[in-house]
Amino acid sequence: MAKKTDPVQARGRARTAVGSQSPGARRDAHRRLRTPRAAATAATLAIGLALTGCGAPASAPATTGEPAATDGPIVLTTFSVIADLVRQVAGDRAEVLSLTKPGVEIHGYEPTPSDLVRVHEADLVMDNGLGLERWFKRFVADVDVPHVVLSEGIEPIDIVSGEYSGRPNPHAWMSPTAAKVYVDNAVAALSDLSPEDAEYFAANGQAFKAELDELAERTAAELPDDGAALVTCEGAFSYLARDLGLQEHSLWPVNSDVEGTPQQIRSQIEFVKDNDVPAVFCESTVNDGAQQQVAAATGAELLGPLYVDSLSEQDGPVPDFLSLISHDLDVISAGLGDGPDPGDAE
Ligand SMILES: [Zn+2]
């Protein structure tokens, strides 16, 4: 298989050629600029710094558990799942950070003063879009940092019930097919930021998309093709269900809506009984109490958790994007597919 051009050499050449336009130099320039950028900005930053006690110089050794600094630009994303996707493309040429920590619920997140400081320190900000981070749009509106929406170009699937009915379902990253659009958008945005590294980003993007294709193919082979039903807590699997030819039924449409009402539970129980659904699932960032009631009332097995809106910590089961998708597909296959059933073991 054709290998990428030697990225290290290419990078060295490019950096030498463009001199002060290199990402490292640009980042330094950004840092110098941060103080004089605007009086209002400086004042806001001062408030943020005072509130957070985060006054260490930017070059201080990392002590926050975040990935080690590179000399590349800083790319700030909104949550851990898309942070890792972008990191797979950026490799060692940019420092990709997530505004929210693993385990934090991204729907309806309330940004803090220190988040604003981090936005000002970034060379590029990226969010999911499709209405997931409504707070983020307002948050970056007055900040002079390039902003890219990773889901741009996706064919949205609408939410069909509840308060957000008719709006796009934001969870497009859960489809390996749609995630490839995210990858392309990340490649384009990073290449705009560091044109000298464009070949490196393109090669990383190609490799990552090949892994997504492989995952999708493997799962299609393991799942029944008879329109089986994927029954979850949040309606976060519309894009994945479409890819896999599954029906989808959830307790609530999206985590920012009401969760686990008696009516939602009754509707889910009815669906599970009508469709002889063998297993139901719930996600890592929500309470599975309502789904436990569904399982108890129907005899369906409750499996999971599935991971959607957050990665796990590094030592958990889904520390990165591919392991999240792979984990979920394995759990779903075990519940609905032709995978080995532990109960049948002889
Ligand atoms: Zn969600």
Image: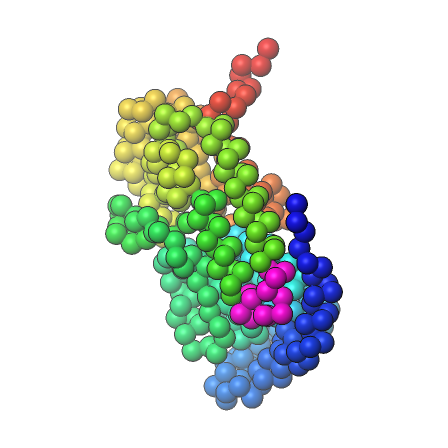
Question: What residue sits 37% from the left and 34% below the top?
Answer: 245
Q: Is residue 72 above or below residue 274?
A: below
Identify the residue shown where x is 51% and y is 63%.
Answer: 188
Residue 262's spot in the image, x, y percent? 29, 37
Is residue 136 left or right of 66 when viewed as pictured? left
Residue at the image position 39 percent from the left and 53 percent from the top: 154
As drawn, 114 above or below 239 = below
Looking at the rendering, which quadrant does residue 142 occupy?
A: bottom left
Name the spot of residue 328 as percent of width and height, x first. 51, 38
What's the colour scheme? rainbow
Q: Is residue 23 left or right of residue 162?
A: right
Count up the numbered dots: 0
Q: Depth check: 234 or 287 in front?
A: 234
Percent across and percent down for residue 207 are: 60, 49
Residue 21's image quarter?
bottom right
Q: Quadrant of residue 190?
A: bottom right
Q: Main secondary structure of the magenta part?
A: helix
Confirm whether residue 95 shows in the render: no
Residue 236 drawn at (x, y percent): 40, 44
Task: Pick out the residue farthest to the front.
Answer: 2
Which residue appears at 41% of the width and 49% of the height? 171
Is 199 included in the stretch rendered in magenta? yes
Front residue of this view, candidates 256 and 94: 94
Residue located farthest toward the top when viewing the structure as drawn = 346
Please name whichever residue, 294 or 38, is drawn nearer the observer in this view of the structure: 38
**Quick one: quadrant of the N terminus?**
top right
Looking at the picture, tell me which residue is in the foreground, 43 or 85: 85
Q: Is residue 275 visible?
A: yes
The magenta region covers 190-201
The C terminus sits in image quarter: top right
Q: Verify whether residue 237 appears in magenta.
A: no
- Position of 314 with respect to 12 (left or right) is left
